[in-house]
Amino acid sequence: MSIRALVWNENIHERESATVRDIYPSGIHGCIADALGVEADIEAATATLTDPEHGLGERRLAGTDVLFWWGHAAHGEVDDAVVERVVRRVWEGMGLVVLHSAHFSKVFKRLMGSPCNLSWREAGERERLWVTTPNHPICRSLPAHIELEHEEMYGEPFGVPEPLETVFVSWFQGGEVFRSGCTWRRGAGRIFYFRPGHETYPTYHQPHVRRILVNAARWAHEPQPPIADVTDAPNVPAARALEPLVARGPRLHADGEEGFR
Amino acid sequence: MSIRALVWNENIHERESATVRDIYPSGIHGCIADALGVEADIEAATATLTDPEHGLGERRLAGTDVLFWWGHAAHGEVDDAVVERVVRRVWEGMGLVVLHSAHFSKVFKRLMGSPCNLSWREAGERERLWVTTPNHPICRSLPAHIELEHEEMYGEPFGVPEPLETVFVSWFQGGEVFRSGCTWRRGAGRIFYFRPGHETYPTYHQPHVRRILVNAARWAHEPQPPIADVTDAPNVPAARALEPLVARGPRLHADGEEGFR
Amino acid sequence: MSIRALVWNENIHERESATVRDIYPSGIHGCIADALGVEADIEAATATLTDPEHGLGERRLAGTDVLFWWGHAAHGEVDDAVVERVVRRVWEGMGLVVLHSAHFSKVFKRLMGSPCNLSWREAGERERLWVTTPNHPICRSLPAHIELEHEEMYGEPFGVPEPLETVFVSWFQGGEVFRSGCTWRRGAGRIFYFRPGHETYPTYHQPHVRRILVNAARWAHEPQPPIADVTDAPNVPAARALEPLVARGPRLHADGEEGFR
Amino acid sequence: MSIRALVWNENIHERESATVRDIYPSGIHGCIADALGVEADIEAATATLTDPEHGLGERRLAGTDVLFWWGHAAHGEVDDAVVERVVRRVWEGMGLVVLHSAHFSKVFKRLMGSPCNLSWREAGERERLWVTTPNHPICRSLPAHIELEHEEMYGEPFGVPEPLETVFVSWFQGGEVFRSGCTWRRGAGRIFYFRPGHETYPTYHQPHVRRILVNAARWAHEPQPPIADVTDAPNVPAARALEPLVARGPRLHADGEEGFR
């Protein structure tokens, strides 16, 4: 049973900038899908903004175990209905790996319930990621730190809820720091945010970065069937209570009714 | 310097049901504001759905330290712009106390990023809340457990992100359990969800419940000024970096520009 | 590559009480090892208090991926040197599943840094465990709740640090609740506490309980090699710093020295 | 009602090194107590290793709301009985602020249940602490970042359990990062670890650092009375159960007995 990974990319910079296209001739999505697809246990596909329903129709998402998301210039063009569909699949148990500038994607902001903001600088400076949680599955086969000679800087404070686990913290040449690898859980879905990946640098070609992406796919994958009716709020009438129960007092609701939402 | 508490209530059941009106002649909001207002360090006001802007205009919210929220039948009628305004004030540092059926309020779901669902039964059964985190500020002056002879049942799983702290867990006569007191932080704002408070029972008249509401107001209150520009993502040009830095490599952005959102 | 599970039991009650021996003729450890060992991917062995070094010598522990621990009457007889050895292996990455009355074991208290206390009653009452985190790997193939007709009661407050995840919450017939399934991480080791398992009831024969034990073995298993030198605090001399650095100011330490502990 | 702060210091370097004595003529403890004591709501006292019972007798601790701890060269000389007494007071609700090299103090390691290790370098390099949780009470009146021109480096991984909140992250000139401000809760006690404070640099004279120490005293202070019998595990006989209960099945324990520990 393979992990069915889907790499989503807005695919704007690759079309508009020769610089980006030179680094990622098959797109950032293509580059990441290659990193994942060479693994025997992962099947990787891609989808982009201009595909019908952004390539994220019901069926496609139902057949996706882990979704990778890269976006930057076109966050606002992502259809709200698609966002809700992706969010619901996360709640059902689909893993989600949020990459770099996708900190401001609708999907990530919707799941975090927080501003997801940060400070930033595009100066091609050195970034060094330190593993803060050794032997976390996402850190498998990594050294104690990873250097990226050219990256965009993201600086704290990072406007996210306290992570479940902080996996990487970055040092930047210009003097900032950032929690570059963080995990959360929303519903049954595992979420991993991974900071590096600015479009004008060859970050997703870096072997350690590719290792992290593979590790993240395996970590985020939950083989159990999706949670059915993940937003339901079922009424349990007194007559069907697990312990003997006689209903008492005034009521507004009838047995088995739907309740207010 | 008093804590400026604002108690918001949709105020539907009180108008439509004699049962509810008999229990809460001044509305659930009035009853809660009374519990808060008798404390020397708390000023309590109220707002309801039918007030202009639901009583939650910019100025009103700017002057609110802790917002209490009770809603049930009219979640869908709360204006999305008001929801965003409340959410932003939480991020800036306003405390939020979410009560009972407001688990399905737009504000709470927006901040949690999760379904916030549960199972339920309206049978007037006995609920017993156990303190799981003794000496938490929200538990001040409470016994080890609190009994409510008549309450609606809410059962696990509760569709929320793992709380920062679990403060109460409830036992129900019919055989269910529920994490009835949970805390989170979103931006600079502290959030407390408190389960009890079905409209057909006199829960908010119960002295221990009133004690919890007062404790929660004090716990959620942050005296620091609100975070300015809470959603900003400032650009830090290389020339203004804290460490000497020469920009390198290809760029898409100009110094000081706004970036994509 | 199998998961090498080791089930440790003090094995006191089984020898001293005919009641317990009748329920667990091969000991609680034998019963649990049977549950694990039928799975194709798990090799299960056992160790008890009276074995040399309690069956937990260096070599044995080095060859253990997940350790299950049941203790009750003889917590004080467990050798402190063995406790430290087990704790160190957890830090290195060995999983640990702590069962029932082992909440008061030296190993668990040592790893939690908290009292680990609770209230209790041995009355053969009904316990119902509710899944609070659906689709958590530990809940795989479970229904929404599990009933144990006869169990000892453990009541809140449970004197542990806030768990990383709360997986089960129990309802008890006598009116109490308990967070019956909790996870933590210490060093690289995953820890799961599972409440049920009083020696005078056939709890570890119950199919759902056996399913949980199997799930927990898989969840707690980390296939990466153990962290080497897990308590080391290495000195990094200025000359070997990752960024150019000239040492400045007064010093107490020489390059490469060990530092104080 | 003042906050009764007690600043504990081993006071070794101050006696043995002229360098340290010049910076801290009244000892690190004296310098910190000065910072706290100028606040109207804090009474600050000091205690050191050579005082009888290290200055941490039962009565002294019972009268302490928040304990600050600085140690380095003499961790091993701290009496285990005193360590247990301090730990118990934390469980009861006393706040604890752990400073710099006290990451390896017996008290901190005992409460964390983890190695508490890190990498380090004494080169007088620049440290910059970034606020990661704006408007946290510990960050009150601070700028977005704080610079210490000369500090010892501590590098990740920091061998502690995942913090409840990460408040500061440090950047070091030599290329490392560190989670320099972290909070945990153990029993009813709040714990704050604050990284800076190497004995050969004037860190505790720095105004922002002094502000953090004052903020931490207020944050860690819990005005509620200590938890009584904080390690008790009370038996609740069936006859005194909150719900009607008839004891069933075989038993090992008599009503009201103490249970095994």
Image (spheres, coloured by chain):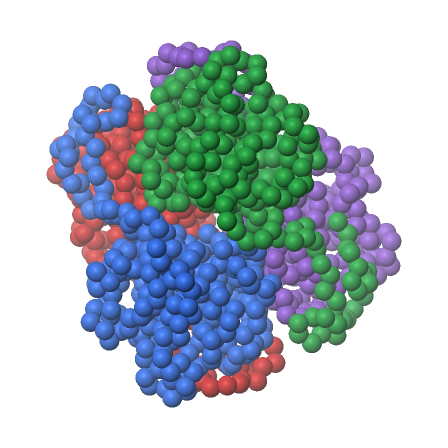
Chain colours: A red, B blue, C purple, D green
On the image, the x and y values in percent for residue B154 come to: 48, 71
Visible residue check, residue D154: no
Is D173 on the left-hand or right-hand side of C187?
left
Is D51 on the left-hand or right-hand side of C227?
right
Name above or below for residue A120 compared with residue D237.
Answer: above
On the image, the x and y values in percent for residue B172 come to: 56, 72
On the image, the x and y values in percent for residue B235 come to: 20, 36
Residue visible at 75% across and 64% down in the picture: C122
In the image shown, does B242 or C209 lie closer to the viewer? Answer: B242
The extreme bottom residue here reads B18
Visible residue check, residue A250: yes
Residue visible at 50% across and 77% down in the picture: B151
Q: Quadrant of residue A207?
A: top left
Residue visible at 62% across and 23% down in the picture: D74
Q: Quadrant of residue C65?
A: top right
In the image shown, does D188 or C244 lie closer to the viewer? Answer: D188
Give the mark count: 0
In the image shown, does C127 or B122 lie closer to the viewer? Answer: B122
Q: Quadrant of residue C57?
A: top right
The C terminus of chain A - image quarter: bottom left
On the image, the x and y values in percent for residue A182 come to: 39, 42
Residue visible at 63% across and 44% down in the picture: D62
